[in-house]
Image (spheres, grey):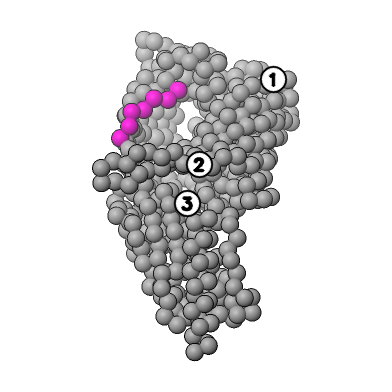
Amino acid sequence: MREKKHSIWLVAALISCCSITAQQPDMPAPVADSSVAAAARFIVGEIFINGNRKTKASIILREIPFHPGEEYPLQDLVKKFEDARRQLMNTTLFHTVVVAAKSFEGNKIDIVVDVKERWYLFPVPYLKPVDRNLNQWIVEQKASLSRVNYGAKVLYNNATGRNDKFRLWLIAGYTKQVSISYDRLYIDKAMKWGMKFGLSAGKNRELNYNTINDKQVFLKDNDRYIRNFVNTYAELTYRRAIKTRHSFGIAYSSEQVQDTIVTLNPTYFKSGRNRIKFPELYYSMAYYDVDYIPYPTQGYAANVSISKRGFNNTINVWQLHVKGFGSWHLSPKTFVNLYAYGGIKLPFKQPYFNQRFLGYSDVFMQGYEYYVVDGVAGGFLKATLAREMLNFNIRIPPRKGKEAERIPVRIFGKIYGNSGYVHNPQPGENNLSNRMLNAAGIGIDILTLYDVTFRFEYSFNQLGQNGLYLHRKTIF
């Protein structure tokens, strides 16, 4: 009888621990008597899933790091519950996830996973400036509507309930473009192999044909299109466990520009050409072990990619890019993170088309948003100290027959600094390559519904310049 009471008491403690841990990861879970808890081992029974109206149960079970029949000590099982909650949140399929003990029979524990699904289909209008960031568009381009892409896009996440993604873009304005892509995480019964493919085609009346004084120089022709392009790719993905995903791909690209571009910059393509066609082979590895991928405050992430673009004298380049991220809590609401990037292109002598380095896409240094730094090798290191200042929900009145919705809002204050360097054997009329670059600043990050992040940063750079900059992306 005494043994049975101990079992009941331990399971009650387990249920309490796991429920609290799953919903409030920053709160320390209550611990039962250490000598009894250390000796107690529990067998995972059935796993019940609630709330998945669209998502297949197999997709949810794939992310859970324990299986029926496995045996764990109490402390390990509590940690497994939190790992499962975190991994399911990182799929970005759900608003909330709770993993907890459901019932027990002796030392056998049945487990329940409660999820609240997101809305997955977004047919939305599209309006976006083409410049590298909002500051460049507003300040340098005077918020010109001629430098805006508009149209419509369809984003269909979890299209078949298997965490697959369908994308269709119909774009007009600065760029005339049609794009379609499909990404399916698993195509085999073992749920390890996946596939992804895409196609885009378009044309532009304006083109960045050179870089002078570390600024992009453009040519615009109102009477005709000066650039035409087609890009297509197909890849296989492999995800043996949970945290790492490998991608093996093949791509094909065709680019053509008007003769005027070649006249203005004979090295835009190699040997004064105005058209190139080339295949590309690539491999990439992505690793995530963080608390929340859209805005990580704890954990590690890495991305490595290597590619071979072109196989003849027209275009021939090997590329290696490495990104690393780490974040550590100093207190429940305060954390520090480091973000490092490094890249190299071989051989070093490359046409302008292959020299883009810092300032493009998500590879940029804070404080240098108005500049680009072309080159063939280099990198940067960013350090940030941040603290959560506010965490609240905005309540939306319920509709008939529906529960009231809440929009989560989290606000973080931060200070940061970054240093970087880019090597360019052909710098031309540019001064930021082949020298150390440094900047620092303060900022506020706002994280809200559907992983939307707004970053307001006031930066100072070594050129004596400062200003307020706006960004959306947080991690690579």
Of 224 and 448, which appears nearest the observer? 448
| Residue that lies at the very extreme toward the top in this rendered image | 223
Residue at the disc numbered 2 = 392
Q: Name the residue at 69% across, 25% down.
A: 460
Q: Name the residue at 49% across, 75% down.
A: 11
Kindly identify which numbered label has been placed on residue 365: none
Specify which label sits upstream in the sequence, 1 or 3.
Answer: 3
- Callout 1 amino acid: Gln
Specify which label sits upstream in the sequence, 2 or 1.
Answer: 2
Name the secondary structure under disc 1: loop
Of 17 and 180, which appears nearest the observer? 17
Residue at the disc numbered 1 = 465
210 lies above or below 409: above
Residue at the disc numbered 3 = 90
Say if the magenta span includes residue 126: yes
Say if the magenta span includes residue 128: yes
Mark 2 closeness class: few <14, some 14–19, many ≥20 residues within 10 Å: few
Q: Would you say residue 331 is visible in this rendering?
A: yes
- On the image, the x and y values in percent for residue 46 come to 38, 73
Query: What range is drawn magenta here?
Result: 123-129
Specify which label sits upstream in the sequence, 3 or 2.
Answer: 3
- Give the alpha-carbon distance from disc 2 to disc 1, as whole Å: 35 Å
Q: Quadrant of the C terminus?
A: top right
Q: Quadrant of residue 385?
A: top right
